[in-house]
Image (cartoon, rainbow, N blue to C red):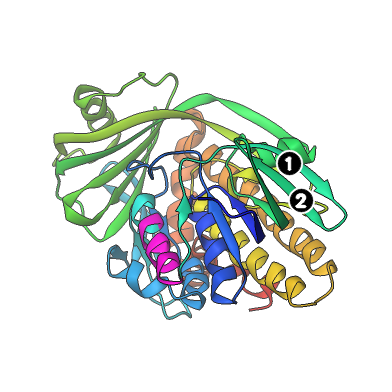
């Protein structure tokens, strides 16, 4: 049974919504989380949790149980078939978590849900938001035919966010003409099982990321992806773009899908008591694995700001949230778009690109700078950490 009132209503139970709710619940705020799906999805795009995100999750008690379920990758490589063009080391990062954690988004969601449950907060499913009306002291949300009064509403409901649409917040940007294949597979391979790799091939990039239990996540940009990519499609991508001397051999496709890349940032993250976080506020290329990580960082910043305001602090803290997180999203969007352009250069530019990558990889300060950027630790200062 849904409550009739709450301090904060969080719409969407993906990693961003769950992390927002957990941040609030840890600070004693009455929070209600709802999601329109009747159960959590078992397939998901995100497969990496970076070091800075683990620091953020550690503040709300979720990092340790999540690390126990993932693969620690102390480095990331950029490859041209069998040649390593650049190796980006994470093991020297100034953090308690000197690695990228390779773990499915569904596992991240399960860990956050378990932490919430331990605080007495249950995700309400399936519950669809059908309307929002602002009042002098907050919002009246309509969940089906059920009215629910809240001081604030957080839209963590994805790229097609209803909260954002009702708030009238613009979502400027563009959609790429290129499509991506995404799959979890089992594969016979000589590649390291504690290292993610980006293969730069003439036909486009391929991401190879090992997950727990012998699973490998594949992501590849293609001109036109099949509706349901099969084993033959994925094997062809590996043969074309992956290792050459000892080619990978797929043995099983656990699931596969396709998607298109969108590059968009919301005009604002706030309209009165309505606030945005995660994909409702920004979407971009999966290059660099930044999307879910940025959403979780949004969640922690917004949850802390809301808790302070509800405890009697000034509402300008919510404007500070937008002022801090939106430029970060624009920066990540530029970074991800740049990586995508680098990976999809026309054939004439690729030899020069490969030489530059190998030169950059030979300079320790440059390698460290790239590691800080990928890990998210470069954003510490802007967040006041």
**Visible in this render: residue 36?**
yes
Figure quadrant of residue 240? top left
Placement of 354 over or under 347, stated as above or below: below
Q: Is residue 117 magenta?
A: yes
Front residue (pair 138, 279): 138
Whole-number angstrom distance, CA of label 2 to CA of label 1: 7 Å
**Visible in this render: residue 377?**
no
Classified by dominant secondary structure, the portion drawn in magenta counts as helix
Region of the chain picked out in magenta, as a range? 109-119
* Nearer-N-terminus badge (2/1): 1
Front residue (pair 130, 248): 130
CA neighbours of label 1 inside 10 A, class few (<14), some (14 to 19), many (20+): many
Placement of 131 over or under 107, stated as above or below: above
Q: Is mark 2 in CB contact (under 8 Å) with mark 1?
A: yes
**Residue hosting label 2:** 139
Placement of 318 over or under 58, stated as above or below: above
**Residue lying at 49% horizontally and 45% vertically, measured from the top left:** 287
**Residue hosting label 1:** 132
**Residue lying at 26% horizontally and 34% vertically, measured from the top left:** 255
- Tell me if 385 is positioned left or right of 100 in this view: right
- Tell me if 183 is positioned left or right of 382 in this view: left
**Residue lying at 44% horizontally and 45% vertically, measured from the top left:** 354
The quadrant of the image that shows the C terminus is bottom right
Residue 156 x %, y %: 60, 49
Q: Is residue 113 magenta?
A: yes
Figure quadrant of residue 231? top left
Residue 77 x %, y %: 35, 55
Residue 293 x %, y %: 51, 57
- Tell me if 373 is positioned left or right of 82 in this view: right
CA neighbours of label 2 inside 10 A, class few (<14), some (14 to 19), many (20+): many
């Amino acid at each position: 049974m849904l409550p009739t009132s709450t301090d904060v209503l969080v719409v969407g139970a993906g990693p961003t919504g769950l992390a927002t709710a957990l941040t609030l619940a840890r600070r004693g705020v009455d929070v209600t989380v709802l999601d329109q799906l009747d159960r959590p999805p078992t397939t998901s795009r995100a497969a990496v949790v970076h070091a800075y995100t683990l620091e953020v999750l550690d503040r709300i008690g979720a990092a340790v149980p999540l690390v126990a379920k993932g693969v620690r990758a102390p480095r990331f490589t950029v490859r041209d078939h069998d040649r390593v063009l650049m190796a980006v080391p994470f093991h020297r990062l100034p953090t308690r978590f000197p690695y990228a954690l390779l773990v499915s988004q569904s596992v991240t969601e399960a860990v956050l849900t378990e932490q919430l449950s331990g605080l007495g907060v249950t995700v309400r499913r399936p519950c669809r938001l059908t309307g929002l009306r602002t009042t002098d002291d907050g919002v009246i949300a309509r969940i089906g035919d059920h009215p629910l009064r809240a001081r604030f509403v957080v839209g963590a409901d994805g790229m097609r966010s209803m909260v954002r649409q009702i708030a009238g917040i613009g979502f400027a940007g563009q959609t790429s003409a290129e499509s991506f294949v995404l799959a979890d597979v089992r594969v016979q391979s000589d590649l390291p099982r504690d290292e993610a790799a980006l293969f730069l091939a003439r036909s486009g990039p391929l991401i190879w990321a090992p997950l727990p239990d012998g699973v490998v996540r594949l992501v590849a940009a293609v001109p036109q992806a099949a509706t349901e990519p099969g084993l033959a499609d994925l094997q062809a991508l590996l043969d074309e773009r992956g290792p050459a001397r000892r080619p990978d051999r797929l043995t099983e496709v656990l699931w596969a899908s396709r998607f298109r890349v969108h590059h968009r940032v919301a005009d604002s993250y706030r309209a009165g008591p309505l606030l945005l976080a995660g994909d409702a506020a920004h979407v971009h290329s999966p290059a660099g694995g930044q999307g879910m990580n940025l959403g979780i960082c949004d969640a922690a910043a917004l949850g802390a700001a809301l808790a302070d305001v509800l405890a009697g602090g000034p509402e300008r803290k919510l404007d500070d949230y937008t002022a801090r997180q939106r430029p970060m999203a624009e920066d990540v969007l530029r970074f991800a778009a740049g990586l995508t352009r680098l990976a999809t250069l026309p054939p004439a530019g690729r030899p020069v690109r490969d030489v530059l990558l190998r030169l950059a990889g030979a300079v320790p300060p440059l390698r460290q700078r790239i590691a800080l950027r990928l890990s998210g630790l470069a954003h510490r200062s802007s967040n006041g950490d």
